[in-house]
Amino acid sequence: MRKIFLSVLLASAAFGFASAEKYAEIDGLWYWMDAGTQIAKPCKATQVWPVPEGMTYDDLSNTVYAGDVVIPASFEYDGTTYQVTEIFSSCFADAKVTSVTLPESILVLGQSSFARTTELTELVIPNSVTTINAQAFMSSGLKTLTLGSGVESVGMMSFMSCKSLTDMYVLSTTPPTLEGYNFNMTTTSQMTLHVPADALEAYKGSDWAKNFAQVVAMENGGGDVEVTGITLDRTSYIGIPGETFTLNATVEPEDATDKTVEWSTSDESVATVADGLVTLVADGNATITAKCGEFTVTCSVIVDSTNVGIEAIEAGDDVKARYFNLQGIEVINPAEGQMVIERKGDKVRKMVF
């Protein structure tokens, strides 16, 4: 869907020239365009003025960008090719976008361009960007942010109130200039700054280091850090229907760019899994698999509703409690939520630990 509105702005006679601005909606995104310079900037719908014919201001104000957005490096419109070089101020402010792909043609991020994008958790700023203006990401939901190698300056309050931010990758070998109040009201104790290895000391001696719990070198000097392995805190579990237990996955290296773990079960009728929480459903065997990148690790699960092996627990005068699984095998450190047999002296009981 494409809509176009032409606004002719006559400059004062003192300057002796006229320029034309165009606003067009292309594939659901509004652009400000300058026919003279052939430059285009994606903008907020409410920044379009005057209101295009056939539309009302309510139509514009009700336009909220959402979902996955891909911005092209250039596009042809009305016989002219426009280069997309800047994100207009407040373009995505308060938007419901979940991902935004920026082209390498972008040079500038406007003020508040991604402010309060609470559903945007990850963003990569391309190497072409040199300037990030004030409040660019303020109060966003970003967890991971990558600043390309060309970034030279970051405007004030750009990361203020980014309370979910945990990892920032800055690819420039020279620490970009930081203006004031950039990291106010962020959780610095949870934040790690990843920088090129040959620039590690430069960042540690800069204002950047004051705002992060740790500053670490990227193994490949920049870009993505690949996953090298994944482990689980247990590789087997035996229980009865209705039990739940949690599997904790550790992804290596610690600063891997994408540590997303995918969980699956071989048989949902026996055991299910969601974000590491395993629920035992019915008698049988199942394999729980955790996958990150190209690496997988498994945990074998046996669900048995019978009390096999209980008779094998020897009687004794123990004062200290001992714990056994339902197969009669002693468990030194029962997992929270695990069904066990507790023996203390001559008293025996089945319990959830």
Image (cartoon, rainbow, N blue to C red):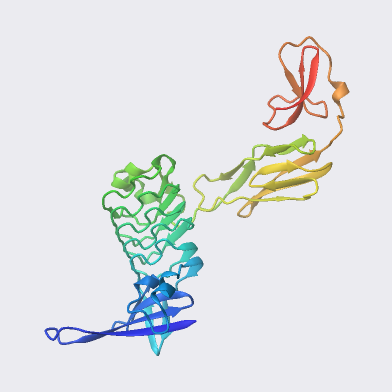
Pinpoint residue 320: horizontal percent, then vertical percent. Answer: 71, 13
Residue at horizontal 62%, vertical 40%? Answer: 248
| Residue 31 point in image, percent of width and height | 39, 76
Percent position of residue 168, x then y: 42, 51
Q: Which residue is drawn at 49% across and 68% down?
A: 69
Furthest-left residue in this view: 14
Q: In this view, does 128 lie above or below 232?
A: below
Position of 64 relative to 311 (above/below): below
Numbered label tally: 0
In the current view of this chain or complex, which residue is farthest to the top?
317
Q: What is the x, y in percent for residue 85?
A: 35, 73
Question: Which image quarter holds the C terminus?
Answer: top right
Where is 106 relative to 335, above or below? Answer: below
Residue drawn at the location 46% of the way across and 67% of the way down: 64
Q: Which residue is at the front of the view, 59 or 100?
A: 59
Residue 105 visible in the shown view: no
Can residue 342 be seen here? The reply is: yes
Is residue 202 toward the left or the right of residue 59 in the image? left
Nearer-the-camera pick, 209 or 205: 209
Quadrant in the picture for residue 83: bottom left
Left or right position of 340 against 118: right
Q: Nearer the viewer, residue 35 or 224?
A: 35
In this view of the protein, which residue sits in the foreground, 197 or 54?
Answer: 54
